[in-house]
């Protein structure tokens, strides 16, 4: 039978074995899980900044809000006078396909006073996939101090604005300026009260049927006439819809529509005949156009000759002596005919001589 000492030693060994197994299991789970596991495949990326902005070693590296690695080293390097802070990042390879050579890395904070971390943005990146040892573009993010300075400027402007408003309110309360006079002037209040009284009287008169507007609103005769007019209008519309009257026949008569359709058909046929008949040939024949132009030219030349005072016809048309002689001849002829009518024997007697 084992002794008491052997039993205690056996229990102690079992407890030590359980503790060691639990610690080992926890370490293995920690090392094999997440982005910080010992057996997780990673690549190294670099980025340069002008200020570390409170970033610490071991800080998270996020891509679009998802943690894909951590910061392994932060140091100052030479050869980068504008951005001397080198940040070394260890990123899980399963996110490598989302990272581009022109992706932007920015040091930002979680909230106003939260932990600083590296945020990688690949939304506008167009180059190829990153490889181990590549350097991402370092983008400057506004730090807390810059935000505070911007806020101080805004607060200063707000303070100036509040002081100006305070001065304006003081002037208004003291009765200075146009607004102050309007607010503190008792006569203005009296005028407003009088105006409101007049408006109230007008509304009361209208409600009682006084005045033109009151009569229009209260007079039942006007309502009856308007109602009768509406009834007549409804009757006219009903008659038109039922085909009564001239307008109703125009709207409801099928023969009118058929006649209009036949007229349009005949007009279309007439236009087709014009487009394909003799008129179309005359309109499209170049020889006919040339002949017509020649005739018009000749008529124009003939008209010029007729209007010219040098030609025979022009002299006949424009010489006043021709007109005067012709007029005199007509007068003498008329006198001769008159004399013959008065004494025909004198002019119509025939004398025969026998030799």
Image (cartoon, grey):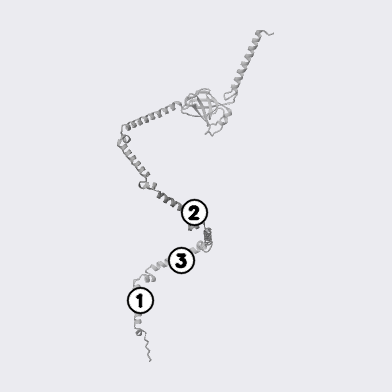
Please state the horizontal and vertical placement of residue 305, each as a whole percent of the image: 40, 68
Q: Are marks 3 and 2 in contact (CB under 8 Å)?
A: no
Q: Is residue 320 above or below residue 20?
A: below
Nearest-to-viewer mark from 3 and 2: 2
Q: Which residue is mark 3?
A: 295
Residue located farthest toward the bottom when viewing the structure as drawn: 355
Please state the horizontal and vertical placement of residue 84, each as a whole percent of the image: 48, 25
Q: Secondary structure at mark 3?
A: helix
Pointer 1 or 3: first along the chain: 3
The label number, if any, that marks residue 330 in the structure image: 1
Q: Secondary structure at mark 2?
A: helix
Pointer 3 or 2: first along the chain: 2
> Label 1, label 2: how many angstroms apart (C-alpha)?
77 Å
Q: Please tell me in which quadrant of the rendered image residue 2 appears.
A: top right
The label number, if any, that marks residue 10 in the structure image: none
45 or 34, nearer to the observer: 34
Q: Which residue is mark 2?
A: 238
Nearest-to-viewer mark from 1 and 2: 2
Q: Secondary structure at mark 1?
A: helix
> Label 3, label 2: how many angstroms apart (C-alpha)?
64 Å
Q: Is residue 46 above or below residue 290?
A: above
Please state the horizontal and vertical placement of residue 259, each as a whole percent of the image: 52, 60
């Amino acid at each position: 039978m084992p002794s008491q000492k052997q039993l205690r030693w056996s229990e102690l060994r079992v407890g030590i074995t359980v503790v060691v197994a639990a610690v080992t299991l926890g370490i293995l789970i920690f090392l094999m899980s997440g982005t910080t596991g010992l057996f997780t495949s990673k690549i190294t990326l670099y980025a340069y900044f002008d200020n570390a902005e409170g970033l610490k070693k071991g800080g998270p590296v996020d891509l679009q809000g998802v943690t894909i690695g951590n910061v392994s080293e932060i140091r100052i390097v030479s050869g980068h006078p504008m951005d001397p802070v080198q940040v070394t990042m260890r990123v899980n390879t399963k996110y490598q396909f989302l990272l581009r050579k022109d992706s932007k890395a920015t040091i930002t904070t979680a909230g106003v006073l939260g932990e600083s971390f590296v945020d990688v943005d690949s939304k506008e990146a167009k180059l190829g996939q990153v490889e181990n040892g590549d350097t991402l573009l370092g983008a400057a993010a506004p730090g807390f101090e810059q935000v505070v300075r911007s806020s101080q400027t805004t607060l200063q402007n707000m303070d100036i604005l509040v002081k100006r408003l305070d001065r304006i309110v003081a002037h208004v309360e003291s009765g200075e300026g146009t607004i102050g006079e309007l607010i503190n002037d008792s006569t203005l209040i009296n005028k407003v009260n009088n105006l409101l009284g007049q408006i109230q009287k007008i509304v009361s008169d209208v409600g009682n049927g006084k005045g033109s507007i009151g009569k229009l609103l209260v007079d039942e005769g006007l309502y009856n006439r308007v109602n009768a007019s509406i009834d007549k209008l409804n009757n006219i519309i009903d008659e038109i819809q039922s085909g009564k009257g001239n307008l109703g026949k125009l709207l409801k008569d099928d023969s009118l529509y058929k006649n209009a359709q036949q007229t349009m058909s005949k007009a279309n046929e007439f236009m087709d005949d014009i487009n394909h008949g003799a008129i179309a040939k005359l309109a499209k024949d170049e020889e006919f156009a040339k002949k017509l132009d020649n005739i018009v030219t000749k008529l124009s030349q003939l008209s010029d000759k007729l209007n010219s005072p040098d030609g025979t016809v022009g002299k006949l048309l424009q010489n006043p002596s021709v007109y005067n002689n012709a007029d005199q001849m007509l007068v003498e002829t008329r006198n001769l005919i008159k004399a013959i009518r008065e004494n025909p024997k004198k002019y119509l007697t025939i004398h025969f001589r026998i030799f």
